[in-house]
Amino acid sequence: MNPPARVRLLPHLVSGWSAALILLLEFGFFALLLAPRDGGPHTFANASNIALILKYSSIYGIAAIGAAMIIGAGGIDLAPGAVIALASVVTGDLFVGGGWPLWAACVAGVGVGIGSGALAAVLVTAASLPPFIATLGVMGITRGAAFLITEGRFYDLSARVASGMAPLGVALALWPGVIMLVLTVVFQVLMVRTALGRHILATGGNEVAARYAGVRVGRVKAFVYMSGGALAALSGVVLAVVQGQGKADVASGYELDIIAAAVVGGASLSGGRASVVGAVIGSLIFGVLRNALTQVPRGTFADRLILGVAVLVIVVMDRLATRERN
Amino acid sequence: MRIHRRSALGTHHSRLRQLASAIILSFMALSGCSKPGDESRRLRFAVIPKALHIPVFDYARTGAERTARRLGGIEILWRGPETTDEIRQKEILESFIAQRVDGIAISCLNGDLLTDAINRAVDAGIPVVTFDSDAPKSKRLAFYGVNDIEAGRALGDGLAKLLGGRGRVALITSLGADNLQKRLDGAREALARYPAINIVEVFDVRDDPVRVAEIIAAGAQRYPDLDGWLSVGGWPVFMRNALDPIDPARTKFVAFDTIPPAPDLLRAGKVQLLVGQKYFGWGEESVRLLKRIIGGDRPQEVYHYSGIDVVTRDNVDAYLAQWKQWESGAPD
């Protein structure tokens, strides 16, 4: 007899918990390491610093939700960093240069991401290009378009966004974290409670079998690449509004950190397995590390090294666990 | 989340993850993550370069740490982005504000982007000074560095004189930084005084020494009859071979920055004029300014211009002798 839906949901939800445990251990470790000895205020474990970690992690985290779905469907996306930049530039161009209302410029920015995702989907499904090559091309096109639009300049949104702006009573600086958390819930539910979510993982697990089982693989791939593009673009739009600039060279190289966040969060690069919650927690693991290492002597010299080791150790452990389970 | 059945081994999986985290955290502890000891009684000054990989900032670090030792009771927190990542630099700056350090000195990758964070720091009672590259719209209390407009003029005038007031020239910059833009403006202004000099192109190298080598090679192909190059940053003279595609008998090269190996390139005749800054002074003067401000002596003037060193083949040996003294501790 099949367990009731609520019970079946549990394993999916807890899949991100091991990553959550790592996050908690990491936070606790740095809270102890950086605890003040003179009884003064804690420089790491305080509300404003946690808000800061959320603010900067969200740049990666929002895009990592899309990366998790794409990886789960057996693909890969190298374009998020470039899409973040292009969306920030388009939003800035329309808002500052074109005089559009902010909401309309933001919608257009996200539209750019949907467009770039659609291009990747066409290249992967219709032209049968390997996702690595297809999205490498999209990355070049989007980054190049951003530079073409700006010609090296940048759009200063901060001059037109009222200082102290607090939509719905929430300070602007807190919005990136709020958006990331809301999207995490929405896409986690989509992945675990809907047929589409199961079809995404079925496509990544065994594309041929999924096709025989009636999954419309092409549509599934189109959905994940377009969603991934939209989420990366949303990250760029949020970046432009909150940080106040649309610029072609922002987020260079972020795509690898975004993929790493998804993988640390439980996504398998061979497809069939991914966790939206895990991907966001993965980005928070990196965010805590980046933040804490600014307080550690020589920390910023070591952060790439430690991030690299963290990714390898977690993924190797995950692989060993999977092998034992199978 | 898995599409297939989860087994009871999930618990084991979880244990392995815990083991992984323990290994990572132990690694972090072993890799130099030490508690800063009884530093809390000392003044904690954060000094943030544009990026850790830009060599000129090593000397600023030396200057800052040396001055902190001389003044006593100061800890220098030297942190910066690994590469010229503006968002990462802002993240580091905001992290120091959340830590409530006693003072911040920063060389801004993008002054406008950092303005609101700098203002928040100053409003929260954390003094901020800028060095090398300013955030002119912010509330920073002081800036120490060259007058970039004048430095750019020195480069432009120097190249124009080397060319006898005529010829086709190309400019090299990295778009976005306030100081580089001012140097570019100064150079353009100086060259504009020579009607027979024509600027054929301005190249953006995005603060990347590898990219500059590529651009110089491509530019030499594109403009084989080019008479001169002018770089408002030191990227071409931070490497020994970036200028190899240029024939010095045909084409003159002037550049900003005088740190090694640039003087060797000057001696070899690959470069004809260099304009140097007070690299050690960036750190030294920033720390002095922060200490002054904390002592209640806020400077009246925001701009503290350091002056420049114009180095040619005629004075390069004297400059190198002076450099050794700076390295051994003489004030810059």
Image: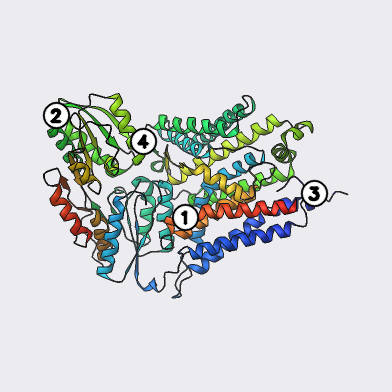
User: Nearer the N terminus, badge 3 or badge 4?
Assistant: 3
User: Which chain is indicated by disc 3?
Assistant: A
Query: Looking at the image, do the residues carrying marks 4 and 2 touch, with CB atoms under 8 Å apart?
Result: no
Three-letter code for the amino acid on which mark 2 is drawn: Tyr
Please determine if labels 4 and 1 lie on a single subunit: yes
Earlier residue among tags 4 and 1? 4
> Which numbered disc flags the more N-terminal residue, 1 or 3?
3
Q: Position of residue A93 (x, y in %)?
A: 43, 33
- Determine which residue is flagged by label 2: B194
1 and 3 marks on the same chain: yes
Amino acid at pointer 1: Asp
Foreground residue, B140 or B146? Answer: B146
Mark 1: few, some, or many residues within 10 Å (few <14, many ≥20)?
Answer: many
Say which of B40 and A168 sits in front: B40
Residue A5, label in figure: 3
Q: Amino acid at mark 4?
A: Arg
Q: What residue would you read off at disc 4?
A: A153
Q: Tell me the chain of label 2.
A: B
Q: Amino acid at mark 3?
A: Ala
Q: Secondary structure at mark 2?
A: loop
Residue at 66% from the left image edge and 56% from the top image edge: A17
